[in-house]
Amino acid sequence: MIESRNAAELLKKEWLLRYPDALEFLQDVVKANDGSIIELLKYTAKLVNKNDYTRLDNGRIEIGIHAKALDIIFQALYRKRTYQGFGVHLNLNEDVSELKSEVYEEILSDIDVWTWDQDNSDWISTYGEMLTGCDAH
C-alpha cells in the first residue's frame, strides 16, 4: 500500500524498469479497500489452492498440502520482513478512555498438546476440547 495513486504509478513504472520481464498488465494499481489486507497476506500465508482439494467417495474432502515446497518457502522467508510500510501516515485516535478492562478469575498457564482428529476435522486437546468446533461434514 502506498499513499497516493501518483506514487503507486511511479512505483509501478520503476518496477517495470528494474524487472523488464514483468508484464505491465499484471502489475495492478488499485485503491485499497477492506479486503486489501487479505490480498496482501495471501501470498505468504496461502497453504493450499483450489487444485489441492479432492472430493472422496464418502463425501469428505481431502486437502493436499505440499509440505516440502512450503518448507522451502518458509525457510526463505525466515527472519525476512515480508511487508514494509512506506508513504502511509495513519491518523490514529489515541483516546483510550473508552477501553474497558476485563478481570479474569482464573488464568490458565498450562501448555497443552493439540492433536489432529481426522474424524472430527479438528484439533483436539488432551482434555478433549475441540479447537474450532467447526462441523466440516
Image: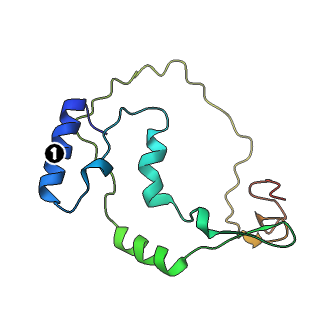
Residue that appears at 15% across and 45% down: 13
Residue 100 horizontal/vertical position (percent):
60, 25
Q: Is residue 51 above or below residue 135?
A: below
In the image: residue 25, left or right of residue 57: left
In this rendering, would 78 be left or right of 39? left
Residue at 45% x, 46% y is 39
Question: 49 or 21, which is in the foreground?
Answer: 21
Q: Nearer the viewer, residue 125 or 78?
A: 78
**Residue 128 x %, y %:** 85, 64
- Mark 1 burial class by Cα count in 10 Å: few <14, some 14-19, many 20+: some
- Work out whether residue 135 can be spotted: yes
**Total number of numbered labels?**
1
Image quadrant where one finds the C terminus: bottom right
Q: Please identify the quarter of the rendering in which residue 36 is found.
A: top left
**Is label 1 in a helix, a strand or a loop?**
helix
Q: Is residue 56 left or right of residue 1?
A: right
Does residue 4 appear anywhere in the picture? Answer: no
Q: Position of residue 47 (x, y in %)?
A: 54, 65
Residue at the (81%, 67%) spot, across then down: 60
Extreme right residue here? 58
- As displayed, is residue 87 above or below residue 96? below
Q: Quadrant of the N terminus?
A: top left
